Amino acid sequence: MALLHPDEMESQLATLTEEGLAALKVVWIHGSVGGITVELTQQILHLLLNRRRKAVMGALELLESLGAISTRTQNYRQIYQIAQPWQDPVDRFLAATIFAAIQPPAASVSSLPSGRFLLEDLQQLLSWVHFTKPALTQQGQLHKRHLTALLTMMGCAANPDELPGRYPEPIGLLMAFLLHRRLVNRTERQMLTGPDLTEWLALPDYAQRAELFQYWVDRYSYQDLQTIVAVLRHLPAGEIPWLDLDSATTELEPLVNPSQRGSFRLRLEHHLATFLAPLGLFELAAGSEPGQLWFRPTPAGLALIREGRPDPAAEPPFPGFWVQSTYEILAPRPVPTGLLWLLESMADRKAETDRSLTYGLNRQSVYRSLKDGQSGPALVEFLQRHSAAPVPQNVLFDLQGWTQAFGQVSLERLTLLRCSSPDLALQIKFSRRTAPFVLGELTPQDLVVDGNQEAALLEALEADGLMPQQKGGGH
Amino acid sequence: MSSYMNPLIVQSDRTVLLEVGNPLYEEARDLLAFFAELVKSPEHIHTYAITPLSLWNAAAAGLTASGVLEGLERFAKFPVPPALRVEIQDLMGRYGKVRLMRGSDGALLLQADDPLLLTELWHQKTVRPLLLAERPDGLVVDPGARGQLKYAMIKIGFPVEDGAGYQTGAPLPVHLREISRGGRPFAMRTYQEQAVRAFHKEGSLFGGSGVIVLPCGAGKTVVGIGTMAAVGQQTLVLTTNITAVRQWIRELLDKTDLTPDQVGEYTGEVKEIKPVTVSTYQMLTHRNAEGERAVHLELLGARAWGLIIYDEVHTLPAPIFRATAEIQALRRLGLTATLIREDGRETDVFSLIGPKRYEVPWRILEGAGFIAAATCTEIRIGLDERVRLAYATADDRAKVRYAAENPAKDVIVQAIVARHPGEQTLVIGQYLDQLKRLSELLGAPLITGKTPEKEREVLYAGFKEGTIPVLVVSKVANFAVDLPDASVAIQVSGTFGSRQEEAQRLGRVLRPKANGQPASFYALVTRETRDQEFALKRQLFLTEQGYQYEITHGEAFLGGEPVGAPAP
């Protein structure tokens, strides 16, 4: 076998027969997702080439004789692979062939906004768990009332009575991810936010998106879905073209595992619409003909698919939200998840459309946030920093008033120290040992002492020669 | 084409968000005014709704679906949602599909280009009872059911283009004066002329009915008078109360060549029917006894009216709607500051009075100096020590009143009056005890519902002339009182949840001032009580309209002097 120049390799590829081309595509596509056994290759080609065994064998032999494919042994099985020197020319050649077949003719497109933003949904779900602390059944499922509330909040029309013990998508994926990533924990009775929450909230959106995408890849590891992702790695540089879903099905379905045929289009459409577009990795559009669906990766999606890691520069810019004197906060979507966490904490979600979220600030919502550990100045600073325009005076005025009011009344743990006489009470009040524990008196015989220091007080009383008796089992 | 730098966010739920700070804001706003309703306009983002009615209003004005979509695409940050595109095309396509016309024999006919649509309507159960016959040139409509038919058609999603024309009323030439009877130069403003033209459509069959939307203080009465001049026929004006009736009459006599013997008042006190008659909705719907027909409703047919003007059409009561359904052959003009009705009967206004013909947002008029700029200040005051205990132990209902009447407000009212020397000031409130107290404290006359009409007129006149600098008024001043020289309003108490009340009260000070000075509106609120909660509800409408409230504590307003319970 002589070494060929890459240009010569591409000339050779251009002369391949239909059978040879089909065989090359099968090996190439599966090579991107871990390789394909000799037996499966033959099986796929057998179906593809109308059971012409001779043609199948001939095509594979031809490719081997050219040096374009070779075999390696893995787990005692022979695996076909694209021979290393041929990899780049084959990538270029087949990507051009396949994209030419699945790219629709240029026409004006009507893009279909997904209306969902999976990272926002994830954040909303986290907030909900954090503030609701939903109850669980003995089987570890959400109680019906919480499940109903969750479905309503996520805009799912499913009837909780008819759910077969699992969540409808995309809640299923999100919930599984939250548990897997330890953002949510299940105790015996409750669902609570988990130990990795703080670390997660500090991640930028692109990193969160990359993790969720990888989880999708691992969870839905159908080879056929991954083949389309693998093919997209080779999209030529330049403007990202629209691809026609029907043509992609025609072109790619015959090349996948025969056991997964038949539902390729349906599943691809489902995954594009339910996960990948809402995750901001793909765009969908109505084709020029009725019923046609076009798709393409977004710059962020392409970066993730091509490089296997996110590209921070491909993130859509967030212009900031608008705080209005109606006490409304209007945020254009998608809202960065770090901001969303605080918004969900300090304001009530009032409206949600495909392009914006509207929150209402009020005394109760701010109180909720303060109880959760936020500070008043931090809330004010957050609004001012992320608002695209100055925060109205009336909103700042009230926000400051509400946060100042926090803690003006507090619950303290106190213990009543009842004395047999006013004289004894006086003695305790003025004793050097016991006086520090006394916070006040209710009656001349009843003193109020710090309930958190009972043990120390008992010791002090004993040291003063008194013999206190504990009644009422503590507090 | 859509671009992130553009000012509009067009959403699938048919709302449109407009970014005020965007350089293309004004162009986009002017475009939206044609086919979308302004829902709220706070300082940063305005919200518009594209509704079937707004689209039909646009279609009635001659706009096409492709024009609407091109405009949206031009100013949108993101592509217009495909479902919305389809909806706009579908809804606008319906306008004009069905028309009311006169047949060659004078019959009232429902016509459509699509014969199948007519067949469908002939069998439609809510429309069928209003039809008399099926003919080759259309469906014959019961002449007495013209309004009902339009109403029924809009309910099934087919707005009717009414080209059946109007009955000719008795002629009445009306000419506008160049110098008013009061001796001041008078001419209609450009937007008022445009409003009249948009309504009248040079007398064509497709004009003559509809609504003009102008903000408080923009001169809706003048538009009504201009329309009367354009139509030139005898006119019935219906308005909200007797004070407004007299205001109309004064304006008519001041700004036109009509003489007192041509203009009549038809109220509980005077019952004159003249070529121009001004009455109230209450008068027309008044019944002597339960179940009895409204005795004065005959006024609608008492003369050969050529035009009926419905002032403050957003308050039009249901019986007037029913009566209006029967007089669709008359030209009808609705005047209002807002198409939003508290009872949600906007479709009734569209089908029975007519589509919106013209609207100018207040910000444009404020920018052009036609209405005064206003600063709104909410002053929060602690509860007076004298009533704190009573408040703490009172039930919820009494609490509202204690907080509203908080005596600690008095000193703030005095301070505000002192801060605006020489400015005409109104003190407006809900509770008579409080108003009496303030009236005595300020040495200012008090007008309540019990003040005789003549006494009111004298006091209003004194206030207008400037001999009375401060007037204390109860809620009687909420509607249609023209106090052109008021530049300060102090609201000391109000009702819960009424979106219109605060707007009406602010409207009292929005008329432009001769010296160009901005108006001041103060709302006094008792801190940390139900009063504060009520105030927030009342203000919502105005903040949604773009007025900003500055909030301050009473102590800060008085320069650190304590007032009521201390601020937190």
Image (cartoon, coloured by chain):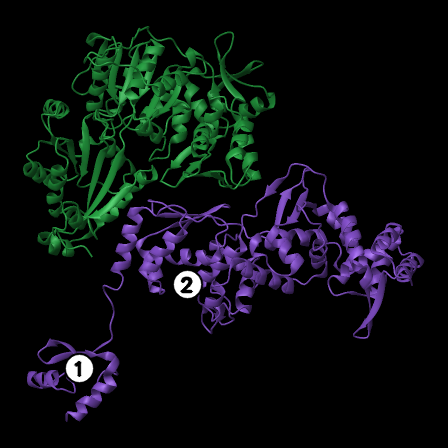
Quarter of the picture holding the C terminus of chain B: bottom left
> Which mark is nearer the camera, 2 or 1?
1
Q: Is residue B246 above or below residue B568?
A: above
* Left or right relative to A128: residue B216: left
Can you identify the residue that label 1 sits on?
Answer: A436
Amino acid residing under circle 2:
Thr
Asked whether B3 or A108 is in front, the reply is B3
Q: Where, by quadrant of the figure, is residue B214 drawn?
A: top left
Give residue B133's position: percent from left, percent from top: 52, 16
Of callouts 2 and 1, the N-terminal one: 2
Q: Secondary structure at mark 2?
A: helix
Q: Answer whether residue A33 is visible to the viewer in this image.
A: yes
Q: Colour of chain B?
A: green
Label 2 with label 1: CB-CB less than 8 Å: no
Give residue B108's position: percent from left, percent from top: 48, 14
- Chain letter for mark 1, please: A
Residue in the picture at 57% in, 48% down: A114
Q: Secondary structure at mark 1?
A: helix
Give residue A452's position: percent from left, percent from top: 26, 80
Amino acid residing under circle 1:
Pro
* Left or right relative to A100: residue B384: left
Can you identify the residue that label 2 sits on?
Answer: A132
Asked whether A295 or B529 is in front, the reply is A295
The reply to whether label 2 and label 1 mark residues of one chain is yes
Q: Is residue A127 above or below residue B252?
A: below
Q: Answer whether residue B338 is visible to the viewer in this image.
A: no
Quarter of the picture holding the N terminus of chain B: top right
**How far apart are the two marked residues, 2 and 1, measured between alpha carbons?**
40 Å
Q: Where, by quadrant of the figure, is residue B278 drawn?
A: top left
Q: Colour of chain A?
A: purple
